[in-house]
Image: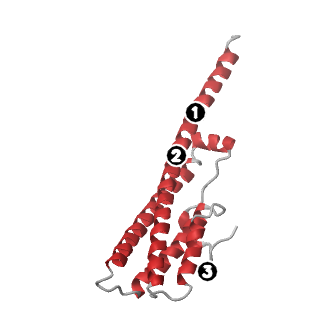
């Protein structure tokens, strides 16, 4: 009879610790997956920066761009890498760059003898496709993370360690009214 209370208290402590460890493990698994996908996406954004800068310089040198076009796109490219902006704002800047590059691809006709520009355009288009698929994968991992912090074992750990929901990229892009306006912090 004297050992009933310590046994119950010990069982509660053991169950609580097991839930905490399992919740923490699951939460870290989702965070790690989300961060891995962001690193991949960030790497692709840097590649897009390099390729688009070379492409725009070549087009500007040949006089195929309207005045100020490359500066406008470069401003949004800088926003893609601005550490003061959140991830969703950086990807909103990417969406603007993507849209402007697609407009350039549609409006400029390259001659047969401009192989270098054609190769740059092909590389840019494949990079844009990779960034789009990578951002969808990141968005899916954010959805899984947000769902995981609301389930029983991880909700407890998320509350103790102040894990918060992440913004979905699709939702954050919709919140700006003008598509050419870069977000400011």
Structural distance between the alpha carbons of marks 2 and 3: 34 Å
Structural distance between the alpha carbons of marks 2 and 1: 16 Å
- Position of residue 94 relative to residue 27, above or below, is below
Q: Residue 141, percent across and down? A: 49, 54
Residue at horizontal 57%, vertical 45%? 151
- Front of the two marks 1 and 3: 3
Q: Which mark is residue 178?
A: 3
- Front of the two marks 2 and 1: 2
- Position of residue 18 relative to residue 50, above or below, is above
- Position of residue 105 relative to residue 85, above or below, is below
Q: Which residue is mark 2?
A: 32
Q: Quadrant of the C terminus?
A: bottom right
Q: Which residue is mark 1?
A: 21
User: Foreground: 175 or 93?
Assistant: 93
Q: Earlier in the sequence, mark 1 or mark 3?
A: 1
Q: Residue 128, percent across and down? A: 43, 69
Q: Earlier in the sequence, mark 2 or mark 3?
A: 2
User: Circle 2: is it few (<14), some (14-19), or many (20+) Cα within 10 Å?
Assistant: some
Structural distance between the alpha carbons of marks 1 and 3: 45 Å
Q: Residue 10, percent across and down? A: 65, 20
Colour approach in the figure: secondary structure
Total label count?
3
Residues at badges 1 and 3 in contact (C-beta under 8 Å)? no
Q: Is residue 115 visible?
A: yes
Label 1: state its secondary structure.
helix
User: Circle 1: is it few (<14), some (14-19), or many (20+) Cα within 10 Å?
Assistant: some
């Amino acid at each position: 009879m004297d050992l009933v209370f310590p046994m119950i208290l010990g069982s509660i402590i053991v169950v609580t610790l097991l839930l905490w460890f399992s919740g923490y493990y699951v939460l870290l698994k989702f965070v790690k997956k989300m961060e891995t996908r962001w690193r991949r996406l960030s790497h692709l954004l840097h590649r897009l920066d390099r390729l688009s800068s070379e492409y725009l310089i070549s087009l500007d040198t040949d006089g195929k761009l309207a005045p100020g076009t490359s500066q406008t796109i470069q401003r949004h490219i800088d926003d893609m890498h601005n550490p003061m902006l959140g991830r969703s704002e950086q990807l909103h800047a990417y969406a603007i760059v993507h849209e402007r590059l697609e407009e350039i691809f549609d409006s400029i006709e390259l001659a047969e003898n401009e192989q270098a520009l054609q190769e740059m355009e092909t590389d840019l288009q494949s990079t844009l496709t990779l960034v789009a698929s990578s951002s969808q994968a990141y968005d899916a991992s954010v959805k899984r993370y947000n769902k995981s912090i609301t389930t029983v074992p991880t909700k407890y750990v998320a509350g103790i360690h102040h894990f918060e929901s992440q913004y979905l990229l699709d939702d954050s892009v919709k919140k700006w009214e003008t598509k050419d306006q870069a977000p400011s912090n």
